[in-house]
Image (cartoon, coloured by chain):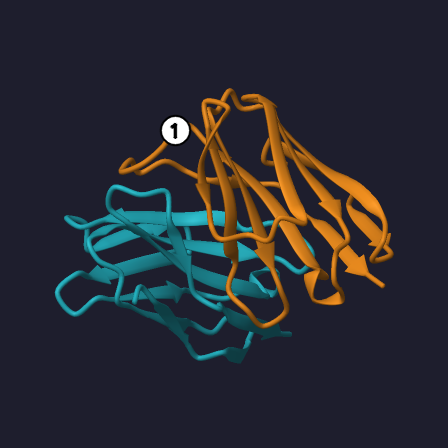
Amino acid sequence: ETGVTQTPRHLVMGMTNKKSLKCEQHLGHNAMYWYKQSAKKPLELMFVYNFKEQTENNSVPSRFSPECPNSSHLFLHLHTLQPEDSALYLCASSQDSTDRVDEQYFGPGTRLTVT
Amino acid sequence: KNQVEQSPQSLIILEGKNCTLQCNYTVSPFSNLRWYKQDTGRGPVSLTIMTFSENTKSNGRYTATLDADTKQSSLHITASQLSDSASYICVVSAKGTYKYIFGTGTRLKVLA
């Protein structure tokens, strides 16, 4: 395993539900990322946190709300999602930030289905 | 526009054979290029990372090449194994940003 865990692994939710995805990294890294992976599409970067501060919001709709209480934990709060939001949501971490050749370690992902 | 294109989209080979996957990019200014392996239902795992000054890097049976002038990279897999069946994703990072531009991947299937 890569040291990045995600829960739950699978989630089915209705469009009116509120749920949260959790990511935890045990690698002592300072940067954490949320990605969306839809079928037959490239991974899309959603959010980046560096030292608990959000440094990137890639024009993500407000129905996705990230939270980073500390460098080891990252949440993605979901509310009033649409069926097209169904995808694999991947969390990743790296030591630090821009312009360094840092390894990015990915979690196993949460498979989200919006009904 | 920063883009990463991979070819072929999918590939089937017999166990023991070699194969080469291609990646073309338009990301600028270039920082580094990575190849990832992603098994079905799992997160990507890094195979190689190359910066501008590196033109080849190996990781076991995987060898990546980079031509920064033509903005092309390849991933060569030698003596393929059944466990090599996965998607292989090329990722290019732009200098000075957190942005990682992902290709759509090549889905490789190795048959016995």
Residue A25 percent location from the top left of the image: 60, 28
Q: Is residue A93 among the parts visible in the rendering?
A: yes
Residue B2 percent location from the top left of the image: 31, 64
Q: Quadrant of residue A102?
A: top left
In the rendered structure, the answer to whether residue B47 lies left or right of residue B86 reads: left
In the rendered structure, the answer to whether residue A45 lies left or right of residue B20 reads: right
- The quarter of the rendered structure image containing the N terminus of chain B is bottom left
Amino acid carrying mark 1 in the image: Asp
A64 w.r.t. A2: above or below: below
Chain A's shade in the image? Answer: orange
Residue A90 percent location from the top left of the image: 61, 47
Name which residue lies at 54% across and 40% down.
Answer: A92
Nearest the viewer among A67 and B101 is A67
Q: Chain of mark 1?
A: A
- The quarter of the rendered structure image containing the C terminus of chain B is bottom right
Nearest the viewer among A75 and B14 is A75
**Within 10 angstroms of label 1, few (less than 14), some, or many (20 or more) residues?**
some
For label 1, the residue is: A96
In the rendered structure, the answer to whether residue A112 lies left or right of residue B104 reads: right
Name which residue lies at 47% across and 50% down.
Answer: A58
Nearest the viewer among B111 and B97 is B97
Q: Is residue B15 among the parts visible in the rendering?
A: no
Residue B13 percent location from the top left of the image: 53, 78
In the rendered structure, the answer to whether residue A46 lies left or right of residue A22 reads: left
Name which residue lies at 63% across and 69% down.
Answer: A39
The chain drawn in cyan is: B
Name which residue lies at 39% across and 51% down.
Answer: B100
Number of on-image labels: 1
A59 w.r.t. A39: above or below: above
Nearest the viewer among A94 and B56 is A94
Report helix, strand or loop for mark 1.
loop
